[in-house]
Amino acid sequence: MSVSIRLSRLGGKKKPFYRIIAVDKRKKRDGDCLERLGHYDPTRTPVEIVMDVEKINRWIANGAQCSETVASLMKKVAAKAKKAEA
């Protein structure tokens, strides 16, 4: 079974809200997930991104692949964490 870390869409029409999930690549976008890893809300100001980085890194170590969108969100979270440290 190949695992993908990707977004699952929730929310209403023109009010998107996404969960970051680990899921079998063959499943549908909004199908059953193996584990919830965070969420992303683009409608808020500033944009809300909440991730459990430890769980994501554990899945990646076990062979999961991130979607392009999740990878870019991880970069934003890492940059934000670096700014907070400085």
Image: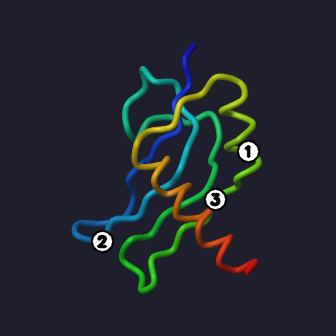
Residue at the far front: name it.
86
Left or right: residue 50 versus residue 53 is: left
Residue at horizontal 45 percent and vertical 84 percent from the top = 46
Position of residue 7 relative to residue 31, above or below, is below
Tell me which corner region of the image, top left, top right, bottom left or bottom right, holds residue 12.
bottom left
Please, what is the three-letter code of the amino acid marked with disc 3? Met
Please, what is the three-letter code of the amino acid marked with disc 1? Lys
Q: What residue would you read off at disc 2? A: 15
Q: Nearer the viewer, residue 32 or 47?
A: 47
The image quadrant where one finds the N terminus is top right
Please, what is the three-letter code of the amino acid marked with disc 2? Lys
Q: Position of residue 78 (x, y in %)?
A: 62, 62
What colour scheme does the image use?
rainbow
Q: Are the residues at dot 2 and dot 3 in contact (C-beta closer than 8 Å)?
A: no
Left or right: residue 40 versus residue 11 is: right
Label 2 Cα neighbours within 10 Å, binned few <14 / some 14-19 / many ≥20: few
* Earlier residue among tags 2 and 1: 2
Q: Which label lies toward us, 2 or 1?
A: 1
Which structural element holds mark 2?
Answer: strand
* Earlier residue among tags 2 and 3: 2
The image quadrant where one finds the C terminus is bottom right
Q: Are the residues at dot 1 and dot 3 in contact (C-beta closer than 8 Å)?
A: no
Disc marking residue 51: 3
How far apart are the two marked residues, 2 and 3, measured between alpha carbons? 20 Å
Residue at horizontal 51 percent and vertical 31 percent from the top = 4
Q: What residue would you read off at disc 1? A: 55
Which structural element holds mark 3?
Answer: strand
Residue at the far bottom: name it.
45
Position of residue 75 relative to residue 46, above or below, is above
Q: Position of residue 39 (x, y in %)?
A: 54, 60
Residue at horizontal 55 percent and vertical 17 percent from the top = 2
Tell me which corner region of the image, top left, top right, bottom left or bottom right, holds residue 31.
top left
